[in-house]
Amino acid sequence: MSALLEFDVVSKRFAKRLDAIERLARRLGAHVAEHTVHAVDRVSFVVNEGEVVGLVGESGCGKSTLGRVGCGLYAPSDGAVRYRGQPVQTADGARRPIQMIFQDPFASLNPRMRVGEIVGEAPRVHGLVASGEVEDYVAGLLQRVGLDAGFVRRYPHQFSGGQRARVGIARALAVKPELLICDEAVAALDVSIQAQVLNLFLDLRDEFGLTYLFISHDLGVVRHLSNRVVVMYLGRVVEIAATEALFAAPNHPYTQALLVEVPRIDRRRRTFVPIKGEIPSPLAPPSGCHFHPRCPHAMPRCASEAPLLREIAPGRQSACHLNDR
Amino acid sequence: MTTLLSIRNLRTEFATRDGVLPAVGDVSFDLERGEVLGLVGESGSGKSVTGFSILGLIDPPGRIAGGSILFNGEELVGIGPERMRALRGRRIAMIFQDPMMTLNPVLSIETQMVETVLAHENTSHAAARDRSIAALARVGIASPAERLAQYPHQFSGGMRQRVAIAIALLHSPDLIIADEPTTALDVTVQGQILYEMQKLVRESGTALVWITHDLAVVAGLADRIAVMYAGRIVELGDADAVLEAPRHPYTRGLLDSVPAATAPGQRLRQISGSTPSLLKLAPGCAFRERCSRAAAACSAMPELDDRDGRRVRCHFPLIEAVV
């Protein structure tokens, strides 16, 4: 297996610039600092060719930001993202093989464009098909994702949510990608439609030999699709493991809590035992290990020193001081 | 146990430019005191509109076109606005998906909670304030007296939902209707809210209708489950029975669609097709286009048959093999 996409100590910070009044106040001697959010904090992992990597975490953990850095939509503040060894940001043509599928099937399609243009524009611009053949090409793609080829003249508002998700997938496939970054691609869909789209992802993977980085908050979906899982909390990776190993024996206390909290049909009328507290604001993350205020095993060391992500078993990494004992 | 809520043949319609949309086609169910009912369905199944109908929250162009809603023996369909206002918030409360639908962003939590108490009871401001603090403490909000003075934007999403729950609990209502209250929340926070709700309804004997699209959420919470499809209940029964041995092909399909039902990496057993448009609903069973068991008989609407406490709206229900 060779590395397809590589995150090498990637950080992404967003700073809120000071407005005119705040700049003036600072010049007059007031203590006004720029707000900086560390959306992604020194993240390193590799997506190998042909693999499905699940990226899970709760809201604000930086998983979507990381996905966007991965496909070159955002430039990393620090570190590098490489695709087949080439930097994604600067290499010519390095970004076409990486396509993104977005969560909201309503916001990610231009309402003023017909489906034929939405799907056909990029392959025409990239010169993948001659302009005379675009229509047939699009019709073939629509059929492949389970839509009627006659839909090319329709506008997005004429489709249901599940059909729009399929249009989004057809658009990504149009440029013959190798890696799909799916950002909560099925989160907005009803259960019965979600199953159809997940099946489509599985079929396409076999047919086109695709690699996926599958970003989701839904552990059930991630468990079903992924070979490996990366767990994030407040901008940092806390655990990386093969899917089976992770679900059988989660190492990091946050992963453990996450797995316990997932509602399951076979776990009936149980007494809920919640983990305490809520996710802190990423504007002011806790010191040391970000999880320590909510962690049942927290020690004094956890508040002062951030644990490093290190290997605890072959192919398995976790960032927790408990592993040092 | 006595019956608290009894709904018979409820029909709620919306007049649209393209014709009359029967959001709720025909819904009947009973709810006992202190019972938790999970009302499950996909988008457009009519589960939320059923909840809104109970509270009299259907505004034009929508209207309750027929049927009956008996609450404590009192008919709620066609009830005057004065009487409805006296019940709403006091005997029946609602928790919405988005807590900002309950909370006013420009008023402090104190103003909103005290107002809710005084709307239904003639008591002093100080007493109302004490009750509000107690209610906040019950839903697990730390230092409730200080938090009471704050505004909604100073609370996180999970905390806001707790405040909304505290407001719903202020008058110890007989019935709470909760419309997807944890859908917008993170998994760990959702676990906390489910925990609080379970504890609170047990303590106070409040009946709960929990509306959701997620079978897994109600699996851990509900005594009984009602599954809705295209404006009708298609299956209703004890939670264990419905989840372990569903009899309606749609319920079976929903349970099979959940990734956990299939070995990782295998194709999921999907339901083909999509939900029909309620505007162009053909007569007969609304699920027949997507159903593998459909036959000629399905072009007539099946009744919601009652068989040993299980109600199923299907001509060809799935019956467990008799051993």
Image (cartoon, coloured by chain):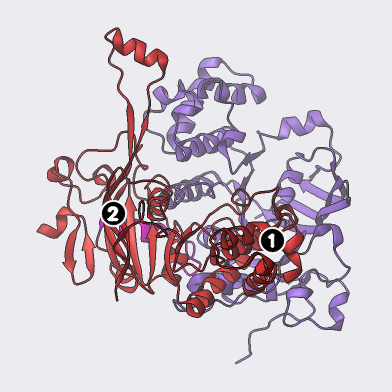
Q: Which chain gets the purple colouring? A: B
> Which residue occupies the foreground of this view, B194 or B90?
B194
Q: Which residue is farthest left?
A: A325
Which residue is at a point 46% across and 30% down the rendered structure image? B134
Where residue B97 appears, as percent x and y from the top left, is 59, 44
- The secondary structure type at the circle numbered 1 is helix
Q: Which residues are magenta?
A: A252-269
Indicate the chain on which mark 2 is placed: A
First in residue order: circle 2 vs circle 1 = 1
The subunit letter for the residue under badge 1 reads A
Quarter holding the N terminus of chain B?
bottom right
- In percent of width and height, residue A119 lies at 62, 61
Q: Nearer the viewer, residue A88 or A312?
A: A88
Q: Amino acid at mark 2?
A: Val
x and y, in percent, of residue A236 in the image:
28, 49
Q: Would you name the residue on which mark 1 appears? A: A116
Callout 2: SS: strand
* Residue A295 located left or right of residue B286: left
Relative to residue B314, is residue B279 depicted above or below? above
Q: Identify the colour of chain A in the image.
A: red
Say which amino acid is labelled 1: Gly
Query: Counting other residues with Cα less than 10 Å from the Cα at mark 2, is it few (<14), some (14-19), or many (20 or more)?
Result: many
